[in-house]
Image (cartoon, coloured by chain):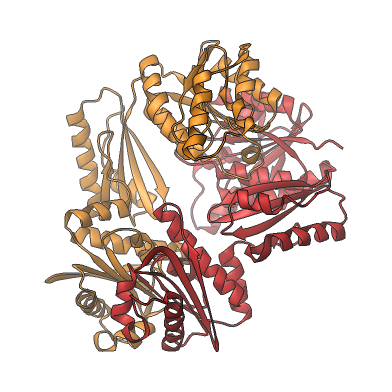
Chain colours: A red, B orange
Amino acid sequence: MTAPCAEILSQGDEVVTGQIADTNAAWLSERLTGLGFAVKRHTTVGDDLENLADAFREIAERADLCICTGGLGPTVDDLTAEAVSLASARPLQEDPDALRQIRIWFAGRAEPMPEVNRKQALLPEGAQRLDNLRGTAPGFALNHAGCRICCLPGVPHEMKFMFDNAVEPDLCARFPTQPEQLITLRVLGVGESTLQQRLNSIALPQEIKLGFRTVPPENHVKLTFPAHYPAAKRDAVTEEIRRMLGPSVFGIDTPENSDGTLIECVDRLMRQADASLATLETLSRGHLAQLCGALPWWLSGLALADSERIQARLGPYFKADSTDPLANAGAVAEYLRQQEGSTHALVCIDSRHTPDILYLAVAAGADTITERHPLEGNPRYRHALAAAKALDLLRRAL
Amino acid sequence: MTAPCAEILSQGDEVVTGQIADTNAAWLSERLTGLGFAVKRHTTVGDDLENLADAFREIAERADLCICTGGLGPTVDDLTAEAVSLASARPLQEDPDALRQIRIWFAGRAEPMPEVNRKQALLPEGAQRLDNLRGTAPGFALNHAGCRICCLPGVPHEMKFMFDNAVEPDLCARFPTQPEQLITLRVLGVGESTLQQRLNSIALPQEIKLGFRTVPPENHVKLTFPAHYPAAKRDAVTEEIRRMLGPSVFGIDTPENSDGTLIECVDRLMRQADASLATLETLSRGHLAQLCGALPWWLSGLALADSERIQARLGPYFKADSTDPLANAGAVAEYLRQQEGSTHALVCIDSRHTPDILYLAVAAGADTITERHPLEGNPRYRHALAAAKALDLLRRAL
């Protein structure tokens, strides 16, 4: 079966002039690809009626599905309904239910409905209204020239909510797609070329696609299985790859379950363990405090410009010129844990003699684990990588 | 004069399937708009030769300028040169200088050039090569059907470097554009509707456009003046607006000079004052340490989950149940400055009795300034806003 062809159309002067980056298109593409559509093209046009109508006409000729975002607001710049009306030769008609909902939305805020908002109830004749429970702009959907056209608001949280609740069920009923199965192995601190080398010896069946992606500081290994690939065989292949990549894999996302980012993994494990954390950092320059700071198990974070400043504060427990910086980091972690009364303490520091080496320690009750890692790259990348390496050590200790 | 029409074309399966968001398009749009082009459309297509060639043909018909990014790599998925060759009926030819540069790039890394990279030296006949000093993929430019087509690599830092150094001078010579003059006033902690109200009483001349944009936690007021609007009159209007907005304006970007973001403003002032900083925070949850941590004047940051923990550390200087939390914050800032030996200390904390109030203090020599602000919004926004409010107080103290 050939996958149905989808295109995405974004509308707005603020997008086409670069004032805002279009994150809606990437989100929709990923969702549509996951549903089994072949997304062939994204188009962005400004607030120009003729250009927008042209874009709808062209896409309707090429694609089976067009998802459009933006241009449903109340002002004169909001032209989506008019452009679809023009492109599909369906006059605009006031939808009484849409108008009622817009009035209710304003009534809920104890405000009168401004007259301009009446425009938002105008939909192309025969279009199906898509209710917007999070804003004033209803969306709509219709068939034109063999293409299903769905128009959604540009505000991301309204758009996503409507896609999930109204558009996706409709698409699944209309398009009998067979989505591929995507598995993502999330890895920390192993570059793409090293990952490729480690996987060189595996002979993957032809129908499984292998891909790589970098989302600093994470690297992802992506396995795409055909729609009907048996789950047991799929999981066996995944497990073999995980074993070849070793402990650098910190999470696996499958169609059924997502482990999420590194801080999401750590958050889950910390909550499960009913643990609490204090941190001390130099090389990560506040990144560790900021990453953990919003989470309920975090108690305190001390960030210092260099290890000399640790000496000044924790002199009895830390020797800045120690010849054993790892033991040093471990001793400080143990002291920090006791001082802060936390179940865990995480230390992420440098040593005066080896500026490009990161020393990590996690203290957890009787056990203290230490590790050293060389750091490369530009300063901002190093700060983020040092914090990620520290979180990864904590994850393995949990 | 009508502005010349520009379009942006992005190539790549990873973009069209939503695996990465296309930040190149927004960057290019903003730059082209600033140069005086009317950017009419963005298009993204996947790694498909026919689709890509079609996109080039369509854009060449509609636009005076097409900037394309991506698809210049060495693999079979990299199809830009071939697609332009197809669309413009110019055969591909090996460019000896391009091949030499690719060899030199690998030689500089003491690696032999893989045979696949030879493909990157193939350019459409008659195209002008655009050297890539930061990677292996050269770009190229040519005229087709009245449209200037410029193809650049997709790696953002390579693309931006080539645009600045090779494309922009070429465009300025070819297109006698008249860019509008954009002034941005950067404001902290004043919402869009309040900004609009404050500016209600001003009668701007018709030819000046007023706009608003939110980049949390900053709000921007944008004034667009015609190309030939006199600088003295422009600056007088800007100054009047700045005065109406009051001290919440922390920076102004003009075509001649950019103040930049809040942390960039603070960084500049700290360096000018030869100052150094220690921070203590609760409500901003590590954001302050992370924002300042990468900068050379930062000495230390202590982040704590709540004000009870300040009491435990700085008991003699801090009273968690004080009825005067502002004085409390001031006392702690003074103590912190002395303890850390910094010229400035910045404190950003809560008080047990008023959880939604932020207490700020900056200690600088003999002077200590304190301020209180109510905080609203979801937790993550509050953390970022609290840190920004603290930095803004430091800015005003400098």
Q: Name which quarter of the figure residue B342 lies in.
A: bottom left
Up-down: is B67 above or below B174?
below
Residue A371 x/y as whole percent: 52, 72
Residue A143 x/y as whole percent: 76, 33
Residue occupying the point 85% across, 58% down: A231
Quadrant for the N terminus of chain A, please: top right
Up-down: is A317 above or below A292?
below
Q: Is residue B278 left or right of residue A157?
A: left
Q: Is residue B39 left or right of residue B237?
A: right
**Which one is nearer the viewer's eye here, A285 or A30?**
A285
Q: Is residue B93 left or right of residue A148?
A: left
Up-down: is A260 above or below B17?
below
Q: Is residue A65 left or right of residue B309?
A: right
**Which one is nearer the viewer's eye here, B111 or B147?**
B111
Q: Name which quarter of the figure residue B92 lies in.
A: top right
Farthest left residue? B366
Residue occupying the point 33% across, 21% down: B178
Quadrant for the C terminus of chain A, please: bottom right
**Which one is nearer the viewer's eye here, A150 or A193?**
A193
Residue A145 visible in the snapshot? yes
Residue B66 visible in the snapshot? no
Residue occupying the point 79% across, 29% down: A146
Number of marks in the rendered image: 0
Residue A46 x/y as whole percent: 52, 30
Residue A389 x/y as whole percent: 52, 65
Q: Name which quarter of the figure residue B212 lies in.
A: top left
